[in-house]
Amino acid sequence: MAKNKMLTKNVFQITTVFLVLLFCDVTFSFKFEDDKFLPPENFKDMRTDEIIKFYGYPGEEHKVLTEDGYILSNFRLANPGGYPILLLHGMTATSDSFLLRGPRYDMSFLLWKRGYDVWMWNARGNIYSTEHVNMTYKDEKFFLFSIQEYGQYDTPASIDYILNMTGHTSVITIGHSNGCGNVLTMAALRPEYNDKVLLNIMWGQAVMLKYELFKGMMEMSYSMYTRYMNFDHDQSVMKKGSEKLELVKAFCNPESPLLSSLCLMFMGLVSGPNSNQTDFYAVKRMMTKFPAGSSMNAFKQMMQNMRSGEYKPLSYGVTENMRRYGTREPSPYPLGEVKIPTAMYYSCCNDFLSSKADNKLLKNKLTNVIKFQTISYKKFNHGDFLWAKDGYELLYKDVLVLIHKYTPSKYRSEIPIL
């Protein structure tokens, strides 16, 4: 009997030592290097999970299957057990847009440090999401999707995947630019998902575009592209490996001082000029992965909404509209049906892609806007949401406080937000 007790005690001690060693190995296997510099020319050849690991943090890739057969490559800044947050990039961007400045400054890393499990979405058709169960990336049919599919299929699939992986029943979402429409479209078309998003945060929404300051230039660029550049009627836009994308990459080559300077000037013009918040290395990193691919239908829907001043599905012409929608023209998305608590952050005066008037227009269409916040710096532009030098004081701190408030109490960090 005594011998059995001694054996049990030894087994227990050995097991305890093994678990401690295992825990220590997991704990100290990450060597955080927050101040490590990532050159833009290296950034362009790295995937999202590789960028995360470059700084010593846990990065993962996850394949997500949508209901209509697309396979999305989403990435995770892994914090198992933490409350999940999903970041949604803008048009023709990627998950890399949330990793432009490094662990000391990027919202993705700031959330991870407060215990959140951070997930980053990639839209169908961009450089990461190039797979389908029945089609190849080279098939023209692969790109017969519009903005609607981002909200109707991609975002619900991503949320369900996260919930199945983590055991949680809801997530918090943060969208930038066009990515702000994903959750709204989802909740409007699929009401059951209203309960799966605890809080929806929008940065520089590009949902309502009626009063966009860059509207004239967008109209001209779209017309020139469809008439003179897209002579082969390609259904993709700047897809991975295309000649058009290679030309853009050559123009924005981070290794060329002249070309990268011209590229920076262009980004400043599009985002909003004369901001003193621009982190030039962050912009150079962004431009190595932007544009990252989308579809002509997505751009067509965006232009139609810009012209109509509404947020509604793509119009395919009377005959096809009757078949798809049962009406000659598609009706606007029922945004009044969105029940998710929503916070809107916007620039008052210098965001050429998201005007103050359009933010107010969207606010009036929603029924549960719990925060409508203008950025205090008047020259804050569209790109500054991602790379502002004073991003923490101007935006991220307030967002962290709001997220903390909505996070279930048992998942809240005890670290003060200073």
Image (cartoon, helix red, strand yellow):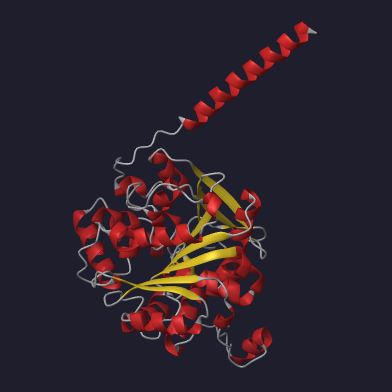
Whole-percent x, y for residue 335 in the image: 55, 81
Tell me where residue 210 appears, x and y as whole percent: 40, 86
Residue 317 placement: quadrant:
bottom right
Q: For this view, does 89 lie left or right of residue 393?
A: right
**185 displayed left or right of 103:** right
* 22 w.r.t. 98: above or below: above
In the shown orientation, is residue 282 left or right of residue 176?
Answer: left
The residue lying toward the viewer, choosing from 367 and 245, is: 367
Foreground of the two, 129 or 135:
129
**Residue at x 36% of width, y 85% of height:** 211
Residue 281 rendering spot, x and y as whole percentages: 26, 53
Residue 72's x, y, as percent? Answer: 57, 57
- Quadrant (top left, top right, bottom left, bottom right) of the N terminus: top right
Q: Quadrant location of residue 331?
A: bottom right
Q: Is residue 56 above or below residue 167?
A: above
Q: Quadrant of residue 194?
A: bottom right
> As rendered, which of 63 and 5 lies closer to the eye?
5
